[in-house]
Amino acid sequence: MSKPVETPHIKPKEGTHFAPVVLMPGDPLRAKFIAENYLENPVLVNDVRNMLGFTGTYEGKEVSVMGSGMGIPSISLYVHELYSFFGVETVIRVGSAGGLAEDVKLRDVVIAMSASTNSTILDAINVPGIIAPTADYELVELAVGAAKELGARYKVGNVFSSDYFYHPNDTINEKLRSYGVLAVEMEAAGLFLEAKRCQKKALAVMTVSDHIFTGEALSAEDRQESFREMMEISLKTAVRSM
């Protein structure tokens, strides 16, 4: 009898598995919340380093959810293992983002078509230029369709994946805004690049929880309500992509 597949960071519980599509919030406790509140019959698949992962069903189809941790190095590690060893075909990042563009408002859903970054992760590709981290177009199209169906306020475009949560140079935000970047977050570029490397699919769908220039921010209650809309878009995208 062959030994079940496992990695140093992901060891599925006996009799469990990951679905072809995995939703990835940064916080593993958020993954637990999603599993318990959105999936039917969720089962714990992974708890190595408390990076919780679950598999359940949504609209009759299997969907998994697992935390990614914060930042590009963390999400890149986990999605590489999911893509390479556990049969995962699609990863959708779900979470929050800080608004940059003037027409991006609190509670808007941002669907990332591409992700610029200040991360050095691009250096490892070693090409004469820069590989642009982009989402899978089919997933973008499905997410837009779901957003329209739900009547959600949404924006599609470029986001900025920063290695800094507290950036030492505040003027960067003005420059990003002048180039049409919609919002700033910390993971999408790493996810998109890893998907291209593994020839898989990826998407990032985020709620604008605060705005860099206006200083506005959602309360805990408002975040929860806005999160619901983002989750419904992401889950509908997940099941319709299968």
Image (tube, rainbow, N blue to C red):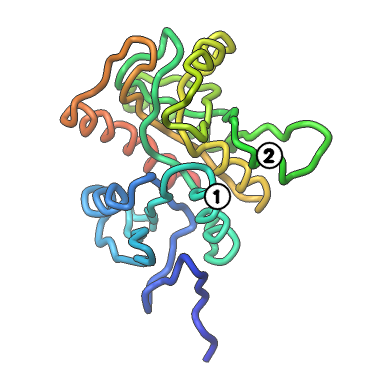
Instruction: Indicate the quadrant where residue 11 lies.
Output: bottom left
> Residue 108 placed where, x, y %?
35, 21
> Residue 20 placed where, x, y %?
49, 57
Apparent side of residue 72 relative to residue 58 in the rendered image (left or right): right
Q: Determine whether the residue tagged by mark 2 lies in a helix, strand or loop.
A: helix
- Residue situated in front as seen by the camera: 220 or 237: 220
> Residue 156 placed where, x, y %?
50, 22
- Residue at the spot x=50%, y=73% of the render? 6
Residue 220 in sight: yes
Apparent side of residue 128 relative to residue 115 in the rendered image (left or right): right
- Callout 1 amino acid: Ser
Q: Is residue 39 above or below residue 174?
A: below
Which of pointers 1 and 2 lies earlier in the amino acid sequence?
1
Q: Determine whether the residue tagged by mark 1 lies in a helix, strand or loop.
A: helix
Numbered mark located on residue 122 in the image? 2
- Residue at the spot x=53%, y=26% of the render? 160
- Residue at the spot x=50%, y=45% of the render? 241
Numbered mark located on residue 95 in the image? none
Residue 242 in sight: no
- Callout 2 amino acid: Leu
- Residue situated in front as seen by the camera: 46 or 59: 46
Residue under numbered circle 1: 76
Task: Sort mark 1 into few (<14), some (14-19) or many (20+) by Cα contacts within 10 Å.
Answer: many
Task: Sort mark 2 into few (<14), some (14-19) or many (20+) by Cα contacts within 10 Å.
Answer: some
> Residue 133 placed where, x, y %?
63, 35
Q: Is residue 214 above or below residue 25?
A: above
